[in-house]
Amino acid sequence: MLSWYYSLPRLTRYWFTTTVVVSCLVGLFDIVPIERMQLDWSMLFYRKEWWRCLTSIVAFPINSVKFFRFPLYCHYLVRYSAMLENQFEKSPAAYLYLLIIVAVLANVAGILLTITNLMKVSVMAVVYIACRLQPDVNVNLFGTQFKSLHLPLLLVVLDYFIFYSLEALTGIWIGDLYYNLKFQYPNLLDTPHILKSFLPDVPHFSGAGEPSGSRAAAESDPEPFPDSEMFGEDLPSNTPDAHDDLSGVDEPSSESGAAAESNPEQGNNPVKQRRLTSRNLH
């Protein structure tokens, strides 16, 4: 159990732990009244209880009616937040910025639509973004297997017809808004430098937060360079890169030149010359 817990990405682990601890305090043990944690615009603006913007996301009312919903939401939180954070493994600050934007939009939607608990809204936004970034992952729901791209819409339908709620739809709207702003107008959501100072980029990773199959992801994660012996054409001599690569090759010694003269077939074979040159480059 501990190995699974510590294998979770860092920000996902923090979010999951805070949600479980705070929800147990307000739901199971009644140490803190849930009313002190819920989003209430009158308390925000008149009594300046700004902590409600955060506690409404991590505090879920665990009672007899909603007891079985909490493990379900925690499952989606852990699975899809971890999947999404792994997409941002090069830049954890970018994923933290994503969570901040989702939290701000969830609070705005909660105030406008009088939603007091924002856990489902925030989780559904993360689920939607993760499914858009990895649309071809197979998921299983009630014994039916389908692509992850269709999961958010199915969860909205179930949420409406089973719980008579539009909170899942609100989360999808937030996720879609972030997705379009991030990948259609990437300059609008550049990660602030102050976040990168706290969570610096991790080197030796590529393609953080790019949709699968996009041109940006292809440019940030190029295909491996093929083996030199597989080339069928010589490197162009007028290309600067090719000149730089070949400049470090030593001149053939007198012994190698004598060997070439003694074996003219080998010396005049351009294919074998290219193979010898490629081996020297390695």
Image (tube, rainbow, N blue to C red):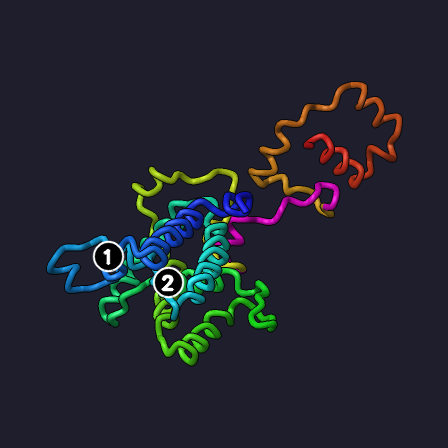
| Residue displayed at 58% across by 41% down | 239
Magenta residues span: 213-230
- Residue occupying the far bottom of the picture: 161
**Badge count:** 2
Q: Mark 2 highlights which residue?
A: 62
Which disc is residue 52 wearing? 1
Secondary structure under badge 2?
A: loop
**Residue 221 magenta-highlighted:** yes
Coordinates of residue 234 in the picture (x, y in percent): 70, 43
| Residue displayed at 20% across by 64% down | 40
Coordinates of residue 54 in the picture (x, y in percent): 28, 54
Query: Real-space Cα distance between discs 1 and 2?
Result: 17 Å
For the question of whether residue 48 can be seen, the reply is yes
Which disc is residue 128 wearing? none
**Residue 180 magenta-highlighted:** no
* Residue 142 shown left or right of residue 227 in the figure: left
